[in-house]
Image: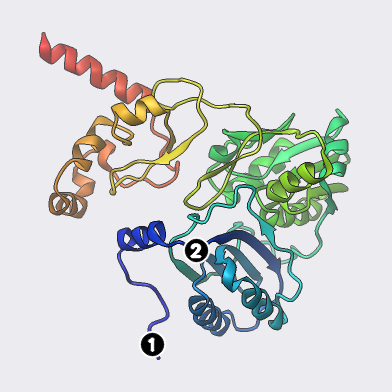
Amino acid sequence: MALLSNRTDKNILKQRLKEENIVRKTISFYRYVNIEDPKELRDTLYSVWTELNCFGRIYLAHEGINAQMNVPEESWEKFEEHLNTISYFAGVPIKHAVENNSKSFYKLIVRVREKIVADGIKELAFDPSDTGTYLSAKEFNEAIEDENTIVIDMRNHYESEVGRFDRAFCPDADTFREELPLVIDHLKGQEDKKVVMYCTGGIRCEKASAYFKHKGFKDVHHLRGGIIQYAKEIKEQELESKFRGVNFVFDERIGERITKDILSECHQCGAPCDVHVNCKNDDCHLLFIQCPSCAENMKGCCTPECMRIAALPIEEQRELRKGRMKNGPECLSVYKSRLRPNLKEILKNKVSLNKKDEA
């Protein structure tokens, strides 16, 4: 059997995407459903979607599917037809991106995982299908206008940093598995209150709503289709957006702007900014917020040390990666926001050292 994966260098794939002249639809969908053999289904999906020239990141597990993709407009009908021939996914609600950017993904990844959303839940009695009540955008707006309603953001801290709903509690966590116990602890003693929650596309808050019910919360609701569907509904129905700022998304776009509000600041200089970037040092790729001025001054890097490494010849960079654990804390391979370095402090210390050297 042919190898059902893509081994082409990512820079070549990105260049091909940049040069292609077709239009792609950026979409996402998920469904909690009992999949008997996710490995076999994975190979089928990869083969068909490769033929249709689809790109994206798709996770399969016995508990269901979680997909973020872009599909060529010319292949859209065949894509939908094929999806509906699979009993697990027939009629699955598909969410279209607010900003339909054809460059959202540059290759196809279909992986089998233990769960489509890593939750850290070990309780055998937990039933993920016993979810809370769906709320439309209009119903969600009405619910959060009541000051007695508890509003919960079930996303990571770097997502809520750039965009969130009014009055939402935003847990200071890097992962969904970290958020669940944090939120449960935060709401201890308020099990009888009305709780409404949201996430990017609905998949996390749907599972969280079931977990909250499992933990004894009586009145649990979640936003149908997440922020992506909310943005579509408020536009179609001419409703006020109670979500402010940017909706963080997990693809090449990184964010979709919902309103003009800027809620965050550049992690390097403190200027108002909500643009997430990945450090240009390939051994770092730290996710952080960087304004245009700092992007120019720092060459897209998070620290002076990463600037130095990114400027080296590729072969030297590869050698450094082999021994990165010896290169000091600023050169460690860090992903997303796991280490949360204080970039302002690092730059401040660097400037101070430079002044001492000059003296």
Question: Is residue 159 left or right of 184 when viewed as pictured?
Answer: left
Figure check: 134 above or below 137: below
Q: Position of residue 8 (x, y in %)?
A: 32, 69
Q: Tell me, yes or no, if residue 188 can be seen here.
A: no
Q: Position of residue 116 (x, y in %)?
A: 60, 64
Is label 1 in a helix, a strand or a loop?
A: loop
Of all residues, the one furthest to the top in this rendering is 359
Figure check: 211 above or below 311: below
Measured Cα–Cα span from mark 2 to mark 1:
27 Å
How many numbered discs? 2
Question: Is the C-beta separation of discs 2 and 1 under 8 Å?
Answer: no
- Residue 42 or residue 207, whichever sits in front: 42
Which residue matches tag 2? Answer: 22
Which residue matches tag 1? Answer: 2
Q: Residues within 10 Å of mark 2 (few under 14, many from 20)?
A: few
Q: Residues within 10 Å of mark 1 (few under 14, many from 20)?
A: few
* Three-letter residue code for mark 2: Ile
Figure check: 204 above or below 293: below
Q: Nearer the viewer, mark 2 or mark 1?
A: 2
Q: Earlier in the sequence, mark 2 or mark 1?
A: 1
The quadrant of the image that shows the N terminus is bottom left
Q: State the scheme by which the image is colored.
A: rainbow
Q: Residue at x 88, y 41 (%)?
A: 192
The quadrant of the image that shows the C terminus is top left
Is label 2 in a helix, a strand or a loop?
A: loop
Of all residues, the one furthest to the bottom in this rendering is 1
Q: Tell me, yes or no, if residue 207 can be seen here.
A: yes
Q: Residue at x 87, y 43 (%)?
A: 139
